[in-house]
Image (cartoon, grey):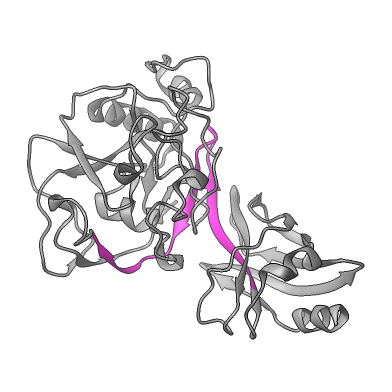
């Protein structure tokens, strides 16, 4: 019975072609109790990497939400182009968790890019989604349709080390943690950081719009409809009030969301580019927020707040000159990167 199960699995692996990079020559072979998946990754530009995922469907490919627990190798890693890449799956250990009758698998790659300061960007394929929530706070309403173009967004929140390398100082309250998110920075401070970063790199980094932020937090075109960024169980993906230990934590310490992006719920609030204002009920394309205002948008919740505030649709705002030890940011850039 186990042998038949393994042979059935081998026939149902697919290769995926995404955003110009390609996973090719996928082969799956049985080695005792494991399946080793080898593949080639091509089509990446210089400096680009791709985050590898193994997706599972138990209904023939209609839904891809089944979580695999016994996968190692390249999964979850940022991989450069090359041949003979490898994923190792302990299939017999996983078998008891798979209850569907039509099981399929896909190897996927999400494009990312790394600059000289270690700031890694994840490619987000544009699309249409429902922004906001009719069940949340009043300023999350009305839920409305938003269509976005492609963009990149930071895989992690900008860290204290990265800020220090650009600005020559570290304003954070929770110092002595290079890999923790920089905090105690205002929206205005972030604009100065971006100006200097762009001068050093020749790129056009910016803050994400509020719509881009929410779309990425929801998992973009790969969204599984989670309440938090990557899970309905906040403890899997966020540092927040119930597990905070009274401070921020190193970026990437929790599980990523569907796009391989970390800490979009919890750790620190993240500044967005928009002026804060009410939502429009009509459909929008690439919205930029209010044309003017007194406060800028913050998203994602933070290390000292409750789970409900870390929801992907929850909104907060603050004066652009305000600093606090629970506010930081991540970067965005348009696809000219």
Classify 58 as above or below 225.
Answer: below
Residue 259 shown in magenta: no
Residue drawn at point x = 49 percent, y = 46 percent: 237
Q: Position of residue 243 (x, y in %)?
A: 47, 33
Residue at 45% over, 26% down: 248
Looking at this view, is 3 or 41 the one in front? 3
The residue sitting at 33% across, 34% down in the picture is 305
Whether residue 37 is visible, yes or no, is no
Q: Which corner quadrant of the image does residue 223 belong to?
A: bottom left
Q: Position of residue 51 (x, y in %)?
A: 60, 55
Tell me which corner region of the image, top left, top right, bottom left or bottom right, holds residue 14: bottom right
Q: How many marks are shown on the rendered structure?
A: 0
Q: Residue 130 magenta-drawn?
A: yes
Question: Residue 63's x, y, as percent?
Answer: 51, 76
- The one nearer the camera, 40 or 225, is 225
Which residues, given as a range, are shown in magenta?
A: 106-132
Quarter of the picture containing the N terminus is bottom right
Task: Name the residue furthest right.
Answer: 32
Relative horizontal placement of residue 130, taking residue 78 as reference (left or right): left
Q: Position of residue 221 (x, y in %)?
A: 42, 68
Front one among 303 and 36: 303
Tell me if I can see residue 303 in this picture: yes
Magenta-drawn stretch, dominant element (helix, strand or loop): strand
Q: Answer above or below: position of 301 versus 125.
A: above
């Amino acid at each position: 019975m186990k042998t038949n199960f393994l042979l059935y699995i081998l026939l149902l692996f697919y290769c995926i072609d995404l955003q110009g990079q390609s996973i090719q020559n996928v082969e799956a072979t049985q080695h005792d109790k494991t399946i080793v998946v080898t593949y080639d990754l091509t089509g990446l530009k210089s400096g680009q990497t791709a985050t590898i995922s193994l997706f599972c469907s138990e209904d023939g490919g209609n839904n891809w939400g089944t979580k695999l627990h016994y996968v190692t190798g390249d999964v979850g890693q940022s991989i450069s182009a090359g041949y003979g890449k490898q994923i190792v799956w302990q299939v017999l250990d996983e078998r008891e968790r798979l209850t569907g009758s039509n099981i399929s698998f896909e190897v996927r790659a999400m494009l990312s890019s790394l600059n000289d300061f270690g700031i890694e960007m994840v490619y987000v394929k544009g699309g249409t989604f429902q922004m906001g929530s009719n069940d949340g706070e009043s300023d999350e309403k009305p839920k409305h349709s938003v269509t976005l173009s492609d963009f990149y967004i930071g895989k992690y929140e900008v860290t204290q080390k990265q800020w220090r390398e650009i600005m020559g100082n570290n304003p954070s309250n929770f110092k002595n943690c290079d890999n923790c998110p920089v905090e105690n920075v205002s929206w205005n401070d972030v604009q100065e950081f971006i100006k200097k970063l762009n001068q050093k790199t020749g790129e056009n980094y910016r803050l994400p719009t509020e719509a881009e932020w929410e779309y990425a937090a929801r998992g973009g075109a790969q969204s599984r409809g989670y309440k938090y960024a990557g899970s309905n169980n906040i403890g899997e993906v966020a540092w927040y009030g119930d597990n905070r230990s009274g401070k921020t934590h190193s970026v990437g310490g929790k599980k990523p969301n569907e796009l391989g992006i970390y800490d979009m719920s919890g750790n620190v609030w993240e500044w967005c580019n928009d002026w804060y204002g009410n939502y429009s009920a009509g459909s929008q394309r690439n919205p930029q927020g209010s044309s003017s205002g007194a406060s800028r948008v913050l998203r994602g919740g933070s290390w000292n707040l409750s789970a409900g505030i870390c929801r992907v649709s929850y909104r907060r705002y603050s004066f652009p000159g305000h600093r606090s030890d629970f506010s930081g940011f991540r970067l965005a850039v348009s696809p000219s990167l």
